[in-house]
């Protein structure tokens, strides 16, 4: 037996040596703590982690009675001390991440994020004699996670700040990740728009073509670029420009799709309106050429007859009348063109003065009467304009009513009825011109006061004119501070044009009372 003792002692020494080597060379930071929280020993990985070197004043401080992990201010503030106390009570404890700044101990070491495990070392009686504290440096992981979180926060902020809809899809083209901007625009719930439910928010006429294009782009990993009408939460549809990009991973496959929808509704409507304006302008120019060319044939024929020098006096008179009539027609066309050009460019100056409403109506009826009678229409003028005044340009106001009366005469079949009614109130004067003519389609009503609309109303050109009279009406009435409106129940039901002007206090002199009648 005695001979065994040296062998046992040798074995213990060998184990202690191996333990010391393992402790020092362990890749994990290890700190051995006494049962009261003081530091007894640290390994090389601990020194590297905290940059506290053997022989330094800071290392001496760590091993001194002045430093205790259970009273360390940073561990107290970080909520770590309760975990340590559990370990000192005999429990093996996983300690959550904490940021520790060595500079707070008076050194120049780094700030590190670490997680730890505190494991109690017990004697044969089960008493805790030491605690082994092992640290894992997660500083780079925390930095990467923080950077990712900041990028995600910036991305979310950008999404919230932009007026665009931002969305992501899986590599095979399905919707899985939520898009608050999509849901806010369309009113769809997540369950309604996930997978391929987003197609339900598209205009029915756009769904099939969009779905086919999306499937093709997903299959070929090409950029998805299109535009479609997207239903808004209020039920209206808005044109959106759509672009989706395949995001490629390191292996060359598609990791996900990221895309946006941009509201371009106003731009699309503006472009459509511009195209419509160009179309109407082109039709107008063709119509103008036709209108100006028509009088040339009778003028040329009359001129040839006069040039022959053998015509009878009656034939000469008829030729002269033809030339005069066609010249007056051409002059009227040119005057209309000049008028609309001056009005739309703001070159017309009104001669504003108190004007009797009765005088305006009488002047307009007088000028429109030849066309009304030529087409055998019955004209009824009703209302009492006696004592009613407006501030404006008498010539231009007469022009407004003449245009409305001539318009009614042109677009009412022969033998029709035209009514002019005036209602005078203290604040305003309302004049209505109503006919039982060809009427207007509901789609044309919003455009009737636009330039060149007449070509749409009369493509066969049987009524004549350039289609700019109503545009002049609106401009002139607006210049007088009034408004003009049109109403029709549809084709074949006639039209009613209403002009409203601000009334003025009674001016010197009186107008002519108007009563119902047929000129």
Image: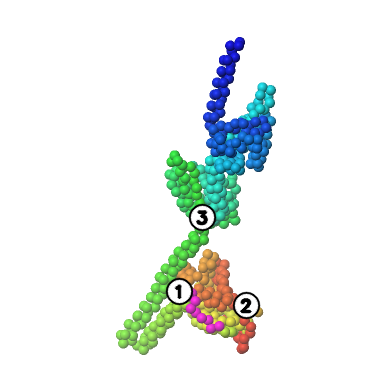
Q: Nearer the viewer, mark 3 or mark 2?
A: 3
Precedes in sequence: disc 1 or disc 3: 3
User: Which residue is found at the position 47% from the left and 45% from the top?
Assistant: 247
Q: Separation of disc 1 and disc 3 at Cα?
A: 41 Å
Mark 2 and 1 residues: CB-CB less than 8 Å, in contact?
A: no
User: If the image is split into quadrants, where does the C terminus sit?
Assistant: bottom right
Name the secondary structure under disc 2. strand
User: Which residue is found at the position 49% from the left and 55% from the top?
Assistant: 241
Mark 1 and 3 residues: CB-CB less than 8 Å, in contact?
A: no
Q: Separation of disc 3 and disc 2 at Cα?
A: 46 Å
Task: Tell me if mark 1 has few (under 14), some (14-19) or many (20+) residues whose alpha carbon lies within 10 angstroms of its own.
Answer: many
Using the image as rendered, state which of residue 110 and residue 439 is in the foreground: 110
Precedes in sequence: disc 2 or disc 1: 2
User: Which residue is found at the position 67% from the left and 38% from the top?
Assistant: 71
Task: Tell me if mark 2 has few (under 14), some (14-19) or many (20+) residues whose alpha carbon lies within 10 angstroms of its own.
Answer: some
Precedes in sequence: disc 3 or disc 2: 3
Q: Which of marks 1 and 3 is in front?
A: 3
Q: What stretch is highlighted in magenta?
A: 344-352
Residue that badge 3 annotates: 262
**Vertical position of residue 222 compared to residue 44: above or below:** below
Give how far across and how far down residue 217 sits, in percent: 45, 46
The label on residue 466 is: 1
Give how far across and how far down residue 81 sits, in percent: 66, 37
Name the secondary structure under disc 3. strand
């Amino acid at each position: 037996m005695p001979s065994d003792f040296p062998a046992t002692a040798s074995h213990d020494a060998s184990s202690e040596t191996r333990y010391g080597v393992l402790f020092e060379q362990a890749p994990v930071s290890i700190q051995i703590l006494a049962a009261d929280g003081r530091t007894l020993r640290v390994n090389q990985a601990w020194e590297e982690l905290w940059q506290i070197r053997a022989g330094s004043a800071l290392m001496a401080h760590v091993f001194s009675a002045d430093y205790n992990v259970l009273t360390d201010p940073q561990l107290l503030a970080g909520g770590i001390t309760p975990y340590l106390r559990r370990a000192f009570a005999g429990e093996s404890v996983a300690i959550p991440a904490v940021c520790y700044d060595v500079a707070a101990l008076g050194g120049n070491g780094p700030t590190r994020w670490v997680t730890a495990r505190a494991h109690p070392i017990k004697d044969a009686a089960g008493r805790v004699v030491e605690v082994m504290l092992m640290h894992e440096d997660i500083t780079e992981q925390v930095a990467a996670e923080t950077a990712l979180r900041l990028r995600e926060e910036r991305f979310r902020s950008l999404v919230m700040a932009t007026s665009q809809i931002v969305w992501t899809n899986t590599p095979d083209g399905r919707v899985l990740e939520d898009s608050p901007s999509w849901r806010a625009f369309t009113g769809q719930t997540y369950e309604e728009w996930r997978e391929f439910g987003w197609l339900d928010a598209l205009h029915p006429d756009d769904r099939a073509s969009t779905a086919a294009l999306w499937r093709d782009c997903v299959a070929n990993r090409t950029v998805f670029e299109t535009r479609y009408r997207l239903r808004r939460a209020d039920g209206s549809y808005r044109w959106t420009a759509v672009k989706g990009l395949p995001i490629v991973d390191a292996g060359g496959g598609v990791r996900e799709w990221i895309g946006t929808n941009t509201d371009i509704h106003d731009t699309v409507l503006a472009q459509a309106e511009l195209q419509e304006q160009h179309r109407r302008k082109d039709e107008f120019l063709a119509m103008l050429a036709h209108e100006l060319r028509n009088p040339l044939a009778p003028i040329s024929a009359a001129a040839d007859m006069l040039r022959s020098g053998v015509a009878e006096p009656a034939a000469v008179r008829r030729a002269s009348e033809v030339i005069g009539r066609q010249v007056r027609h051409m002059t009227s066309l040119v005057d209309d063109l000049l008028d609309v050009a001056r009005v739309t460019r703001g070159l017309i100056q009104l001669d504003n003065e108190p004007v009797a409403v009765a005088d305006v109506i009488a002047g307009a009826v007088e000028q429109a009467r030849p066309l009304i009678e030529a087409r055998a229409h019955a004209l009824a003028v009703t209302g009492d304009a006696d004592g009613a005044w407006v501030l404006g340009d008498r010539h231009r106001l007469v022009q407004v009513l003449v245009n409305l009366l001539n318009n009614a005469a042109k677009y009412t079949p022969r033998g029709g009825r035209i009514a002019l009614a005036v209602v005078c109130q203290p604040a305003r004067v309302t004049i209505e011109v109503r006919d039982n003519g060809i009427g207007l389609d509901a789609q044309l009503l919003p455009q009737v006061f636009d330039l060149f609309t007449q070509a749409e109303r009369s493509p066969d050109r049987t009524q004549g004119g350039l289609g700019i009279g109503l545009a002049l009406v609106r401009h002139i009435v607006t210049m007088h501070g009034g408004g003009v409106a049109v109403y029709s129940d549809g084709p074949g039901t006639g039209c009613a044009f209403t002009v409203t002007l601000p009334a003025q206090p009674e001016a010197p002199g009186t107008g002519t009372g108007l009563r119902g009648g047929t000129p």
